[in-house]
Image (tube, rainbow, N blue to C red):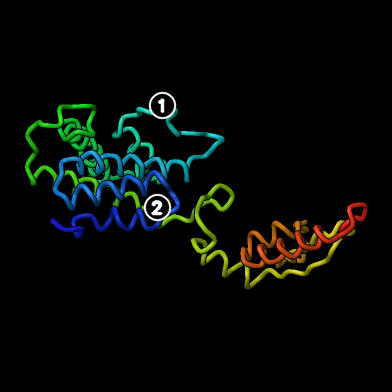
Amino acid sequence: MSADWYPGIRAFCTHWKHAPMLQQTFATLEREFADENDACIDAAKGLVECACRVLIEELDDPLAPLKPEAADTPLGHLVGVATRLLDLGAIRHRAFADLIKQHNKLTETLRVLRNEAGTVSHGKDGFIAKLSAHHRRSAILAADAIITFLHEAYLEREPDPVRTLEPYERFEASNAIIDELASLRGETDDEGFLQVIVSLPGGEELPLAIEPSRLLFGVDREAYKLVLNACREAKASAPQDAEVA
């Protein structure tokens, strides 16, 4: 078996590379799958759960939350919440509704396979007979199908910029519109803060106050470090009773 069995899982984990639990579970999947160990079934189930929780965290509305509070929420329920937040369950089409149900059944199958597999599954005897390679492939393919289904649906949406965990680059189209029609001018107030005035297309203006440290940290980390070192040196060489401007 090769890593070509789970391209959708790899694509999802590459997109969400800043999610630590997802990355740890993915590393376990790759290792156990390459070694042809049944623990990859456990990792496959774990990846579906992680993927659902990442998407729920990203999409859930705090004013009308759907995020499950219980740590042991059933996997099928997590998939159901993720599909609702992606507005997939709202489509009035019988065949599509059946597809959602089949994905939920796949998650239940993963749970059953997980509970029969290796030493990482609920403390079961590590010397139980290994499941067949066919079962391992089935678990990997099911997990990849579910995660690909959710990931591709997510990529068709634009995240809410207020709540998102996504980086600036995710908003390429929106960024282009803002850069085309809005403009900036800068002023410095008496406290040394940068006052940025955003000029909107209709003539309105939006004032923003930005501390020098926040601007540097958000825009150029190397510049932040350079300025920090210069300021530390200036503070260290200044007389103790003098105030550093």
Q: Amino acid at mark 2?
A: Tyr
- Residue carrying label 1: 70
- Mark 2 or 1, nearer chain start: 1
* Residue at 25% over, 47% down: 29
Q: SS of the residue at dot 1?
A: loop
Image quadrant of residue 190?
Answer: bottom right
Q: SS of the residue at dot 2?
A: helix
Q: Is residue 83 above or below residue 169?
A: above
Nearer to me, 67 or 100 = 67
Residue 114: give x, y in percent of width and height: 20, 35
Q: Say whether residue 162 is left or right of residue 112.
A: right
Residue 88: give x, y in percent of width and height: 35, 45
- Residue carrying label 2: 154
Image quadrant of residue 116?
Answer: top left
* Residue at 70% over, 67% down: 201
Q: Say whether residue 123 is left or right of residue 207.
A: left
Mark 2: give few (<14), some (14-19) or many (20+) Cα within 10 Å.
Answer: some
Mark 1: give few (<14), some (14-19) or many (20+) Cα within 10 Å.
Answer: few
**Cα–Cα span, label 2 and label 1:** 24 Å
Residue 121: give x, y in percent of width and height: 22, 32
**Given the current orientation, which residue lies at the most extreme bottom position?**
180
